[in-house]
Image: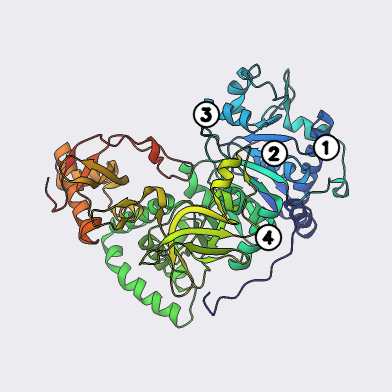
């Protein structure tokens, strides 16, 4: 660890239940949760949050739900989603968050595989669930977030809370810290469903460790944009602010992020790299549209860099005030997760006075394993291991790269009803992440890719697709891409890439140079972009086949390409090794 890194003192908590009760006592009438659109329960203070949890939990008990009952939750980001999840944690139910963007079949399969006896959902899912009553035999209680009163066999969440008698926190059930608290399904497909079991001990330990590395306090305001069913958003974007007395504001949609940053005056935003890439490109596009401003930017960045070095830390926020105001004027920290951000984007945002840091983890690790401290960051690194987390590199090669293995109190219990899969990911007590990486001399972890994606070159060298993808995605003409090994009749396995052209960039190219957008133009332009990447890497890593795609890739909620769904031979082929077709 960097010798200057100091850990912050944080409150000791044993469980999520413990955290919720403590925060209500400490932060009382301070705002905890707020929807930026109209909903039945649009905002709650810390005291109101606990009171609503107590009333809702009591109502669920009166319906007949017993401790350890499995309760599914599905819906858009909102106060009621958080309230449902926290009620499960406080009343010793098992929460089963479901990705609201899954196909209907996958949603129904997770409801079945999770052994849920109740489901709490937003009105969007009423048609799906009302039709599923006959097939989901074990699902007894249907609770709609948006109904004002009960309709037939479907209960109203609001009505249950309003009619429930008061109770106090002293009546909450005792939590077994090591038992299952939630089951998060990382896939919902029939035959592929895999549910990660996390305990309240897993979650509480991760909260304390994260906040000891990156300071968050009761003055912070989080804008929530990522899906809450995902462990990254749920732990870091919901539990973390509630632990520290911050407030969470739920964005109306991804399209309204900038407006919602302004409305909430958010200080912290959790996002995936794609979100920050788009922000950065928009900033530079607006600057380049003003000729004088574009000429001044470089010297202003250099001047403010010097002013920061001599101690004037707020100089960038003052000089680039117009840019900061565009994002609400209060943002102090962007946090990237789900994938590694482009180091050039991180550096570019920082030059305008925004801090962007990244961490690393998986659903199975609750989720954070490593994190970059704000003062001692490395843009090309996933950060340092959190306190209490041990990481080792298994069977490193001559470059120090090997599989990342982890131990710690945040490591999952296992996969739900899947002992074989659980055994397969543990090696003598160490969790096998499936990711490849290495440590640098300062103890910072660097991720190079997934072990199952590695391409073996003719020379026997490892080629990591993610490295080439990161370089390609810096091109404004590349919206999405996927690098992989492809069998060639003459040359055996070669490195190929599928690219989705960026329509906006090609439209701008067409209008600027008064040329038509054709297949030939896209092929020629993207061939040159691939050639630029090839010049930056060793010969054995060079891409030799390019395929153009018309459709975007199917992606996960954190915008990772679902590689297993990609057909490996669409589009037009060119040979970009030397920049020619």
Q: Secondary structure at mark 2?
A: loop
- Distance between the Cα atoms at labels 3 and 4? 39 Å
Choose top left, top right, bottom left or bottom right for residue 70: top right
Q: Which mark is residue 190?
A: 3
Q: Position of residue 143 (x, y in %)?
A: 70, 28
Answer yes or no: is residue 518 visible. Answer: no
Disc 2 versus disc 1: distance between alpha carbons?
18 Å
Q: Verify CB contact (< 8 Å) between mark 2 and mark 4.
A: no
Sequence-first disc among 3 and 4? 3
Is residue 133 in sight in this rendering? Answer: yes
Label drawn at residue 370: none
Pointer 2: residues within 10 angstroms few (<14), some, or many (20+)?
some
Q: Circle 2 is placed at which residue position?
A: 41
- Name the foreground residue: 264 vs 8: 8
C-alpha distance separating marks 1 and 4 = 26 Å
- Name the residue located 71 percent from the left edge and 51 percent from the top edge: 200
Cβ atoms at labels 2 and 1 below 8 Å apart: no
Identity of the residue drawn at 60% across and 75% down = 6
Q: Which quadrant of the figure has residue 389?
A: bottom right
Q: Mark 3 Cα within 10 Å, few/some/many (few <14, many 20+)?
A: few
Read off the residue under disc 1.
Answer: 58
Question: Of all residues shown, which one is farthest toward the left?
Answer: 580
**263 sits left or right of 289 in the view:** right
Task: Kindly identify the residue that appears in the image at 31 percent across and 70 percent down.
Answer: 298
Asked if the residue at tag 4 contacts the one at tag 1, i.e. Cβ–Cβ closer than 8 Å, the answer is no
Mark 2 or mark 4: which comes first in sequence?
2
Q: Earlier in the sequence, mark 1 or mark 4?
A: 1
Q: Position of residue 455 (x, y in %)?
A: 31, 50
Secondary structure beneath disc 3?
loop
Q: Which residue is mark 4?
A: 244
Circle 4: element type: helix
Label 1: which secondary element: helix
């Amino acid at each position: 660890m960097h010798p200057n890194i100091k850990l912050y003192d944080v409150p000791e908590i044993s469980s999520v239940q413990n955290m919720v009760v403590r925060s209500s006592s400490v932060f009382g009438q301070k705002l905890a949760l707020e929807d930026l659109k109209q909903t039945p329960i649009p905002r709650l203070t810390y005291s109101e949050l606990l009171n609503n949890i107590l009333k809702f939990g009591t109502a669920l008990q009166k319906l007949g739900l017993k401790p350890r009952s499995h309760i599914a939750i599905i819906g858009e980001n909102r106060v009621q989603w958080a309230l449902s999840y926290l009620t499960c944690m406080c009343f010793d139910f098992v929460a089963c968050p479901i990705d609201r963007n899954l196909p209907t079949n996958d949603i129904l399969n997770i409801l079945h595989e999770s052994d849920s006896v109740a489901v709490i959902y937003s009105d969007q899912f009423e048609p799906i669930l009302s039709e599923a009553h006959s097939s989901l035999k074990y699902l007894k209680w249907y609770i709609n977030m948006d109904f004002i009163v009960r309709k037939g066999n479907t209960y109203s969440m609001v009505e249950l809370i309003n009619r429930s008698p008061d109770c106090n926190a002293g009546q909450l059930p005792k939590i077994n810290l090591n038992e299952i608290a939630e089951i998060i399904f990382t896939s919902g497909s029939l035959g592929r469903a895999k549910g990660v079991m996390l305990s309240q001990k897993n979650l509480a330990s991760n909260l304390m460790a994260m906040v000891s590395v990156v300071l968050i306090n009761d003055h912070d305001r989080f804008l929530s944009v990522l899906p809450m069913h995902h462990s990254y958003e749920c732990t870091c974007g919901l539990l973390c602010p509630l632990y520290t007395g911050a407030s969470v504001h739920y964005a109306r949609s991804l399209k309204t992020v900038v407006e919602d940053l302004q409305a909430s005056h958010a200080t912290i935003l959790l996002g995936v790299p794609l979100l920050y890439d788009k922000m950065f490109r928009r900033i530079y596009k607006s600057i380049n549209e003003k000729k004088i401003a574009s000429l001044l930017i470089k010297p202003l960045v250099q001047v403010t860099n010097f002013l920061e070095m001599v101690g004037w830390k707020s100089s960038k926020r003052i000089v680039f005030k117009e840019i900061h105001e565009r994002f609400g004027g209060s943002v102090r920290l962007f946090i990237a997760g789900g994938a590694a951000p482009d180091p050039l984007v991180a550096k570019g945002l920082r030059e305008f006075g925004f801090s962007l840091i990244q961490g690393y983890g998986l659903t199975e690790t609750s989720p954070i394993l490593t994190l970059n401290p704000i003062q001692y960051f490395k843009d090309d690194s996933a950060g340092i291991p959190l306190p209490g987390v041990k990481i080792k590199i298994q069977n490193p090669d001559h470059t120090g790269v090997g599989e990342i293995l982890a131990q710690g109190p945040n490591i999952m219990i296992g996969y739900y009803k899947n002992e074989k899969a659980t055994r397969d990911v543990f090696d003598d007590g160490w969790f096998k992440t499936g990711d490849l990486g290495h440590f640098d001399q300062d103890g910072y972890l660097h991720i190079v890719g997934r072990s199952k994606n590695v391409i073996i070159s003719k020379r026997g060298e490892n080629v990591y697709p993610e490295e080439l993808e990161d370089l390609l995605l810096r091109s404004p003409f590349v919206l999405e891409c996927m690098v992989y090994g492809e069998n060639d009749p003459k040359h055996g396995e070669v490195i190929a890439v599928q690219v989705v052209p960026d329509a906006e960039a090609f439209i701008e190219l067409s209008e600027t140079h008064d040329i038509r957008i054709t297949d030939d133009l896209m092929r020629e332009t993207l061939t040159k972009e691939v050639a630029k990447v090839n010049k930056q890497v060793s010969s054995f890593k060079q891409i030799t086949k390019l395929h153009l795609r018309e459709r975007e890739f199917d992606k996960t909620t954190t915008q990772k390409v679902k590689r297993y769904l990609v057909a490996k031979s669409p589009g037009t082929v060119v040979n970009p090794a030397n920049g020619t077709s």
